[in-house]
Image (cartoon, rainbow, N blue to C red):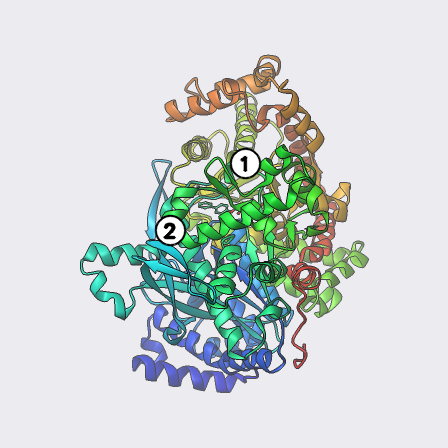
């Protein structure tokens, strides 16, 4: 993918004229953006085609990553970077009097996910392509992305996210590759003499149309595919859907992304979505496989299917359905191929997030799939009879008390189950999935999450990236582990100063954005302390807030107190139905108002809650962060990935020993991270013995008492209702997430942060150590481990890296 500045400028002007009949000076930002996308796309389309052809030619084993969410964000800059076009295009646009930064702002985020799970899927897509691996995404093309968040009087309001209004310029609709998905109705099995034939009666036929997006690898002439499915009415069935409501019923299928994160609700439309993209994906994979006349009893040697959390767990049954009903394979052989093909990642141990669907609901959505799951369950129980006791079998079987347990289906129907950080996998093995670990120890493994260093450092933080180049060269851009060479430079004062300078520049930019977005003025010389993630009780934004209120009350007592100025920055969406999370949002906003408008506080303390947190906003906040808050109750956060993004950008972490924080601590060392709070063993002990009494902390700690009272005595204005809800959740409902238990140690570690910030050179040294170790969390390496240890796939042999 070579291009010169001259050719780019020529091509750009030509396309602008062709597409819009416009000159550069007359074009609107969106027109410039669309023109640029078309130039970029034409720059990789041939390689995209060749990549696919080479898979076929080399008969390469491919992985299909099934995920109900993908959260790619903007693609323009990331594609330019990966193609090796970034600098040329940047300069070419400047030559025409245009700005890449500005044009890029016209791109609407592709927000087809809620948070960690969807963003991980997109980091993995980028890494698969950049590793030159044959890996494709399979998901849903929601018409409405994750809701747009606004604050009105401090309350969260959700607005629809119509991301497709200007069309999506990256995707290609492939109508010719559509498949039919059958849902509802009844099914009968008839012995036709040769095999059992599944006869469907009264089922809806839904046309699944794929939209393919090229996923460009980093400077390796390799482009993979993310395939997202849209539900449409098949031409042959149009008479069956005469009314607008009938049509809506079909289109609704892929209309909205459910905005819940780690909270399961048994809605039938959600179950239909799960079956829809699972069936469409499996059908298109098996159809393609058959095109080359290869025997089906070795399909698992040619394809791997990954189940990202339980949402696509019906892959197991749908794959069986195709092998049994369409290919007439016998059960045992089909089952063998299915288990060998499938693998599963678990992303949470939170009980309320574990999917269980009522049998009747599944019967309505797809009766044949229910039959197959029932048969898998029957054979599972039968197989264990005499080997395991009755209770064990009942605990682990798929269907119990009229409910289908999706995690059990995924584990029993696959050859690999992995957690997403060491502690998380350990908890799965010893606690949550103990029985299955006893049954199938060889299936369990850990794959600690990773992030794409390209988007989260090269694209988001060009100034730091250049600073790193000057110190250790550019090899880290190809292999992020090489960032560890920075460790040889901890004594380089010039470098430390430059790292400080890059941070300050990024903070100035963020300060300008904050001013524009919220009207709040913040000093770039204050500590920028950042908590960005979904709003959830276990993530404990509340602990952060209680500490802020404490700092405020201290300053009210003694306005001349010598404090290190801080700006606390939040970004968080709450699920629309998550009442408690919304109460916390309201309280953060009211505390922010109170503090920011208090003249006696001045610049010592500011609180900024930015609206509509998402990938693009993260790219603005993270490069400017001095401190990252990773303060979930130990055992609750499976991994976390913002912890990795923040350390990569030189933020120091305030953390509990939870999720991947533990591995971060192991890499950077205790001197370069701020650890506090209960450990996993302490939390498990409390949960077992029920001897935690939150009220005792209120009664015995005057600081806690004073801070909590501020929520109910009018000190914090406008939270009459929400203040009491929070107060009660801690004192009456006994503080499920140990906020009060961890408060004192949190305050202590925050004081250590302020103290450390005074010594700028040493602070910058700590930042450097964090950056140097962040390469160990590169998604490229994570994905390579999946490729070797789970999927058994290899990089494309015919390509050259570099
Ligand atoms: C379920 C049912 C209905 C609607 C939505 C859901 C649902 C959606 C997303 C449930 C869970 C979802 O995501 C869970 C998630 O994001 N887990 C996070 O995964 C990250 C990547 O592994 C981890 O880093 C986080 O710790 C983990 O919380």
Closer mark to the observer between disc 2 and disc 1: 2
Q: Which image quadrant is residue 565 in?
A: top right
Looking at the image, the residue that sits furthest to the front is 193
Q: With 647 as the anchor, is 491 left or right in this view?
A: right
**Percent from the top left, x then y, of residue 529?**
58, 42
Say if 471 sits above or below 571 in the image: below
Give residue 687's mark: none
Callout 1: 10 Å neighbours few (<14), some, many (20+)?
few
Residue that carries the numbered disc 2 in the rendered image: 365
Residue ID at (53%, 39%):
568
Q: Is residue 148 visible?
A: no
Point out the image quarter for the C terminus: bottom right
Q: Identify residue for label 1.
A: 351
* Quadrant of the snapshot with the N terminus: bottom right
Report how far apart the C-alphas of labels 2 and 1 lie in the structure.
25 Å
Location of residue 331 by image quarter: bottom right
Q: Residue furthest left?
A: 243
Q: Nearer the viewer, residue 389 or 481?
A: 389
SS assignment at label 1: helix
Residue 10 x %, y %:
44, 86
The residue carrying pointer 2 sits among few (fewer than 14), some (14 to 19) or many (20 or more) residues within 10 Å by Cα, namely many
């Amino acid at each position: 993918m070579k291009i010169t500045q001259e050719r780019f400028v020529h091509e750009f002007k030509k396309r602008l004229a062709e597409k819009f009949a416009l000159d550069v000076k007359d074009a609107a930002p969106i027109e410039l953006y669309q023109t640029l996308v078309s130039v970029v796309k034409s720059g990789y389309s041939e390689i995209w085609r060749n990549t696919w052809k080479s898979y076929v030619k080399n008969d390469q084993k491919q992985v299909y990553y099934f995920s109900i969410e993908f959260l790619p964000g903007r693609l323009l800059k990331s594609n330019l970077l990966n193609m090796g076009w970034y600098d040329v295009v940047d300069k070419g646009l400047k030559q025409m009097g245009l700005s890449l930064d500005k044009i890029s702002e016209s791109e609407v985020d592709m927000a087809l996910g809620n948070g960690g799970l969807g963003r991980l899927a997109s980091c993995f897509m980028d890494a698969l392509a950049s590793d030159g691996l044959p890996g494709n995404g399979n998901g849903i093309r929601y018409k409405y992305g994750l809701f747009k968040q606004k604050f009105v009087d401090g309350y969260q309001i959700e607005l629809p996210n119509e991301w497709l209004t200007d069309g999506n310029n990256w995707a290609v609709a492939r109508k010719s590759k559509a498949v039919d998905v059958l849902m509802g109705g009844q099914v009968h099995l008839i012995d036709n003499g040769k095999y059992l034939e599944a006869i469907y009666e009264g089922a809806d036929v839904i046309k699944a149309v794929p939209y393919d997006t090229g996923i460009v690898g980093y400077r390796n002439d390799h482009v993979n595919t993310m395939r997202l499915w849209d539900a449409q009415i098949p031409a042959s069935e149009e008479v069956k859907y005469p009314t607008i409501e009938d049509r809506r019923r079909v289109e609704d299928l892929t209309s909205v992304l459910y905005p819940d994160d780690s909270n399961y609700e048994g809605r039938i439309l959600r179950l239909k979505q799960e079956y829809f993209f699972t069936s469409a994906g499996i059908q298109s994979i098996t159809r393609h496989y058959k095109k080359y006349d290869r025997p089906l009893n070795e399909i698992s040697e040619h394809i791997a299917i990954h189940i990202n959390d339980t949402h696509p767990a019906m892959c197991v049954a749908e794959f069986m359905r195709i092998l049994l009903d369409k290919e007439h394979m016998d059960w045992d052989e089909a089952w063998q191929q299915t288990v060998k093909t499938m693998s599963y990642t678990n992303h949470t141990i939170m009980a309320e997030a574990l999917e269980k669907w009522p049998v009747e609901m599944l019967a309505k959505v797809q009766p044949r799939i229910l039959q197959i799951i029932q048969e898998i369950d029957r054979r599972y129980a039968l197989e264990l009879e005499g080997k395991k006791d009755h209770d064990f079998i009942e605990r682990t079987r798929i269907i119990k008390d009229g409910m289908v347990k999706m995690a059990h289906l995924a584990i029993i129907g696959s050859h690999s189950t992995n957690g997403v950080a060491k502690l998380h996998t350990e908890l799965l093995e010893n606690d949550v999935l103990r029985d299955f670990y006893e049954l199938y120890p060889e299936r369990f493994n850990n794959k600690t999450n990773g992030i794409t260093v390209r988007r989260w450092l090269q694209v988001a933080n060009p100034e730091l990236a250049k600073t790193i180049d000057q110190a250790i060269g550019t090899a880290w851009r190809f292999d992020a582990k090489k960032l560890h060479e920075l460790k040889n430079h901890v004594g380089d004062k010039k470098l430390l100063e430059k790292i400080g300078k890059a941070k300050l520049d990024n903070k100035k930019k963020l300060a300008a954005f904050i001013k524009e977005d919220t009207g709040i003025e913040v000093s770039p010389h204050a500590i920028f302390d950042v908590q960005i993630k979904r709003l959830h009780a276990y993530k404990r934004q509340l602990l952060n807030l209680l500490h802020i209120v404490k700092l405020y009350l201290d300053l009210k007592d003694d306005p001349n107190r010598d404090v290190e100025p801080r700006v606390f920055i939040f970004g968080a969406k709450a699920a629309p139905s998550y009442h408690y999370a919304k109460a916390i949002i309201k309280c953060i906003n009211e505390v922010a108002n109170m503090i920011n408008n208090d003249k006696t506080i001045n610049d010592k303390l500011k609180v900024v809650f930015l609206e509509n947190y998402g990938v693009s906003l993260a790219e603005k906040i993270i490069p400017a962060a001095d401190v990252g808050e990773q303060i979930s109750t130990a055992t609750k956060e499976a991994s976390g990935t913002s912890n990795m993004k923040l350390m990569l950008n030189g933020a120091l972490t305030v953390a509990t020993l939870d999720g991947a924080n533990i591995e971060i601590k192991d890499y950077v060392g205790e001197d370069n991270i701020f650890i506090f709070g209960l450990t996993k063993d302490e939390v498990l002990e409390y949960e077992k013995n029920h001897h935690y009494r939150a009220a005792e902390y209120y009664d015995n700690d005057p600081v806690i008492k004073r801070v909590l009272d501020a929520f109910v005595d009018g000190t914090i204005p406008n939270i009459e209702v929400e203040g009491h809800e929070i107060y009660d959740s801690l004192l009456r409902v006994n503080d499920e997430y140990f906020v009060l238990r961890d408060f004192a140690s949190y305050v202590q570690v925050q004081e250590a942060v302020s103290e450390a910030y005074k010594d700028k050179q040493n602070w910058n040294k700590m930042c450097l150590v964090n950056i140097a170790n962040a390469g160990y969390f590169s998604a490229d390496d994570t994905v390579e481990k999946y490729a070797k240890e789970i999927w058994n796939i290899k990089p494309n042999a015919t390509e050259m890296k570099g």
